[in-house]
């Protein structure tokens, strides 16, 4: 019996099983379903993805323990002031996410209006000399570094599987997108939202994460049972619906770079509340099959490094520059 590919949906976001892709019993149908979801809403829930639920649960436990530490302890691994070095701990109120705002005066108004009340801890691969990890001393929080790196590399494997599926969905060779993501320059971000007063949110004196799109290729999100992610309806801007947690699922969304790369065939959808992979030195042009004489290229060739660095400094509250993906 053929395995079921699409196993449901949540508020219009398909839930797709990767089982038939992983065991090679029905790769193309799975890939087509995933790409169709990226073309229509830019998001997909993936189940049967190969990352054990127990491993995800353990990482959530480590995250809870980390954010429960005293502030002075967490600040032993402070995020640097540079937005291009997104590693370490960022305390609540230091970051302000904005969307495609480039006027300095307008940015200042937005940033001053309401801080984002969230805290985060970010890591990448250890051997990255350009963007070194910033850890708490091992004797202060033993085991956290090892657990975080193990989870980082587990997510990397899921990322590569997704890229292979998207390549097949685009009717390219399976390794096409993977070849542009050979360097594991991803970011694992742990996020915590401290309690805030509802009336402060209603008066817009504080915020969580404002409406935005991610700016890399893809983002993988794991939610606890509380949830919080909301996705904008691509056909009705300003209307947001909850991306309710699905047990064992990873939510995957396309970023602005992948939308540009696909000549806008794929949607980078606004959401509110990545590991985001890029081989920074490679120059990319619109993907084969996404343009023609009738559908011309909308974008000039660009390297992912140029694109990401042009986006980072404009998304952040002064005094601490932090990427949001």
Image (tube, rainbow, N blue to C red):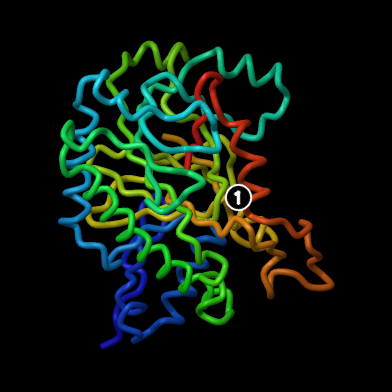
Residue 162 in picture, x, y percent from top left: 43, 67
Q: Nearer the viewer, residue 102 or 234?
A: 102
Residue 304 in picture, x, y percent from top left: 63, 54
Residue 264, located in which quarter of the rendered image?
bottom right
Secondary structure, mark 1, is helix
The answer to whether residue 268 is left or right of residue 119 is right
Q: Who's the residue at 26% across and 18% down the image?
A: 72
Residue 288, located in which quarter of the rendered image?
bottom right
The answer to whether residue 77 is left or right of residue 108 is left
Q: Nearer the viewer, residue 322 or 125?
A: 125
Label 1 environment density (alpha carbons within 10 Å; few <14, some 14–19, many ≥20): many
Residue 319 in picture, x, y percent from top left: 52, 19
Note whether 91 is above or below 243 in the view shown.
Answer: above
Q: Who's the residue at 53% across and 74% down the image?
A: 167
Residue labelled with disc 1:
256
Note whether 216 is above or below 232 in the view shown.
Answer: below
Residue 24 in picture, x, y percent from top left: 35, 85
Q: Nearer the viewer, residue 189 or 149?
A: 149
Q: Who's the residue at 75% across and 69% down the image?
A: 291
The answer to whether residue 55 is left or right of residue 192 is left
Q: Who's the residue at 42% across and 55% down the image?
A: 252
**Count of all numbered marks drawn on residues in the image:** 1
């Amino acid at each position: 019996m053929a395995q079921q590919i699409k196993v449901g949906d949540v508020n219009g976001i398909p839930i797709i099983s990767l089982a038939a892709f992983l065991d090679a019993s029905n790769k193309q149908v799975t890939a087509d379903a995933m790409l169709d979801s990226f073309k229509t809403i830019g998001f997909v829930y993936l189940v049967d993805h190969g990352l054990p639920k127990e491993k995800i649960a353990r990482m959530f436990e480590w995250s809870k323990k980390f954010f429960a530490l005293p502030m002075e302890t967490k600040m032993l691994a402070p995020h640097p002031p540079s937005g291009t070095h997104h590693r370490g701990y960022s305390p609540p109120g230091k970051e302000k996410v904005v969307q495609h705002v480039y006027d300095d005066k307008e940015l200042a108004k937005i940033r001053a209006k309401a801080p984002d009340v969230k805290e985060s801890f970010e890591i990448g691969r250890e051997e990255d000399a350009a963007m070194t990890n910033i850890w708490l001393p091992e004797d202060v929080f033993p085991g956290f570094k090892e657990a975080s790196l193990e989870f980082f590399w587990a997510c990397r494997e899921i990322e590569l599987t997704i890229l292979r599926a998207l390549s097949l969905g685009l009717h390219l060779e399976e390794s096409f997108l993977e070849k542009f993501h050979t360097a594991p320059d991803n970011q694992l971000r742990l996020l915590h939202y401290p309690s805030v007063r509802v009336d402060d949110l209603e008066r817009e004196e504080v915020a969580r994460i404002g409406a935005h799109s991610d700016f890399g290729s893809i983002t993988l999100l794991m939610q606890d049972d509380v949830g919080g992610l909301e996705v904008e309806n691509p056909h009705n801007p300003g209307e947001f619906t909850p991306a309710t947690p699905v047990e064992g699922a990873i939510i995957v969304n396309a970023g602005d770079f992948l939308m540009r790369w696909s000549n806008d065939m794929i949607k980078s959808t606004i959401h509110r509340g990545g590991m985001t992979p890029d081989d920074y030195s490679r120059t990319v042009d619109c993907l084969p099959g996404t343009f023609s004489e009738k559908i011309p290229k909308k974008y000039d060739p660009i390297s992912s490094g140029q694109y990401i660095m042009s986006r980072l400094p404009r998304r952040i509250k002064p005094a601490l520059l932090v990427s949001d993906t």
